[in-house]
Amino acid sequence: MTGRKWFAVSSIVMAGALLLTACFGRADAPVTRTPKPLDPSKPDVVVIGSEIEGMYLARAAVDEGLSVLVLDPREEPGGQLLQGEMLYLDEPFDRSGTSLLQGLVKGLFDEYKKGTIRKLPEYESYYASLTEGIRIVPGITITSLSTGSPGGSSSAVKPEGSSPTRITAMTYRTKNGEEKTVSAQYWVENTDHAALSSRLGLKRIPGMETVFPAKGKDYMASSVMMKFKGVDWKKFAKEVGGLPKAQRFEKYGVNTDVSKDFAYGLGNIGKSYKPSSKEVFLRGLNVVNQRDGEALINALLVFGVNPADAESVKKAHELGVSETLKVRDHLRRELPGWENAEVNGYPRYLYIRDYDRYETEYVMQASDLFSGTLFPDTVGIAGYALDLQGTKANPWGTEIGKSDRYGMPLRSFLYKGYANVIAAGKNVGASAVAYGSARIQPNTAQAGEVIGAILGLIDGRHELASIPEEEMKRLQKLMKKRGIELNGKPGRNLIEGYSPQQIEQVNQGKLVVKPKS
């Protein structure tokens, strides 16, 4: 952990621990094992990056008795949640309206919906409690990897068709310039810029260029969160949310709704905005009431960001900051209750939705999601619209339908041909179209928790990619006792009766899947 003032461990961790207990305390909660003392040169698990999804994996692994070290290439921990302040949380539901939240992440959402976790310090406290006892070393640079192939290697690139490779050690440089080497049983990619996985010699999963034609690789836009104060939310909710649906939709955009806590839709507000350059775009607004006249909006898109390039990130952040002032003036004119809104500071980083992802043992397709598939090695139950955010070529993006519940297999979190390298969070193995749903934070957070627990429960007895089916059933039963159901009822098959050609169109994002009656 770092010594930032906002990360005042002595007070925040104590408060966060109380909150974590309140959020997650339940009769079926597992009794945590005492983790092994951490040897920073030889932990059981090394997590690269500190995005929150991977921290659920780390937490579960520690609670199963494993030692975990987090090595973060970023200067400060917390990624999109704390540094990017992506504090508008999307909840996954099945098509019957049942929430799919399970495990530790459900506790975060419960407090979020109640309004007790809305502001950055509250998220910082939560994050501190989630990561309590886990060592995070920020500002590192990976310099080399060694593998289990004969003779080892300074690069993890492996020949096609060879037997599974194990990463055995990593050499990295600290922000003070010191070289260190660490070995581990498992390695986890948990960054937003493929800091580890880009070194594995794997094929990149084709990206948004397969959906919206582009020259070369393309990605969904990043975002700069916009923070405001001086918002009269009661007036906003009454004068917009209180309108009859037809009138509300006509004036503000289809699917616009404003409650006492949240607002979404408002597409006409984006359509009427004139951005200062082609590199930014205002889409429909997702707004969270942070209390006390404060509100946060997820809507300002920035195109062409390379999160692996510090200069690209810096330029995009500066562009978003300057554009926020212009958006403020637009909101003052267009939205009741926002007449006196002022900018309430800026996030320190971006919300990176999408970057290079690499082949896993199984790459989920849109047809897996729409068919409601449950896999024998399901480690997560997910759901969400296949929401492909905008690119510069198509700034409004598209949605090709909303799935019912579906399973996320362990194999989609295991890099292809590697015995001990795990993808966390937005690195999940999913096609560009399937990624529109699979990428949602609670989906991969819940899967991460299960994977972290599995690492401790199998205790090295099985390779992750070849856990016997009976053993996987046993592990799933154990997770059910802990409140995470993994092999319940499958989702509805929304593409039943589709021809092979239609299914291919679905997988390419060229055919919208309509709800079944």
Image (cartoon, rainbow, N blue to C red):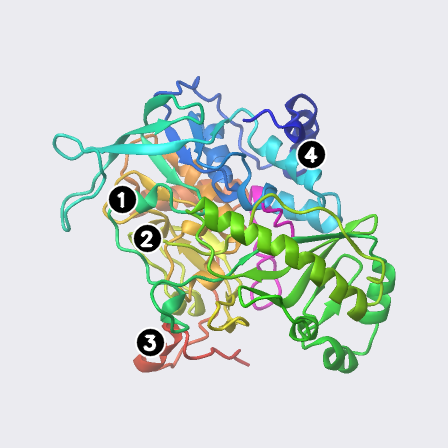
Instruction: Tell me, for residue 386, which label it has, or none.
Output: none
Q: Majority secondary structure of the magenta segment?
A: loop
Residue type at mark 3 is Glu
Q: Using the rendered view, name the quadrant where residue 42 is placed.
A: top left
Front-lying residue, 331 or 473: 331
Residue type at mark 2 is Tyr
Q: Is residue 293 magenta?
A: no
Residue 285 pos. (x, y %): 67, 65
Give how far apart the Cα atoms at labels 4 and 3 are. 46 Å
Residue position for label 4: 19
Residue 129 pos. (x, y %): 61, 31
Q: Secondary structure at mark 3?
A: helix
Residue type at mark 4 is Leu
Residue position for label 1: 200
Residue 327 pos. (x, y %): 70, 62
User: Cβ–Cβ below 8 Å for labels 1 and 2?
Assistant: yes
Magenta segment range?
A: 84-105
Residue type at mark 1 is Leu
Residue 284 is left or right of residue 303, and the answer is right
Q: Secondary structure at mark 1?
A: loop
Give how far apart the Cα atoms at labels 3 and 1 are. 29 Å
Q: Which tag, 1 or 4, sits closer to the chain's start? A: 4
Q: Which tag, 3 or 2, sits closer to the chain's start? A: 2
Residue 436 drawn above or below residue 146: below
Report crowding for label 3: few under 14, some 14 to 19, many 20 or more residues within 10 A (C-alpha).
Answer: some
Give how far apart the Cα atoms at labels 4 and 2 are. 36 Å
Residue position for label 3: 504
For the image, the number of numbered tags is: 4
Residue position for label 2: 358
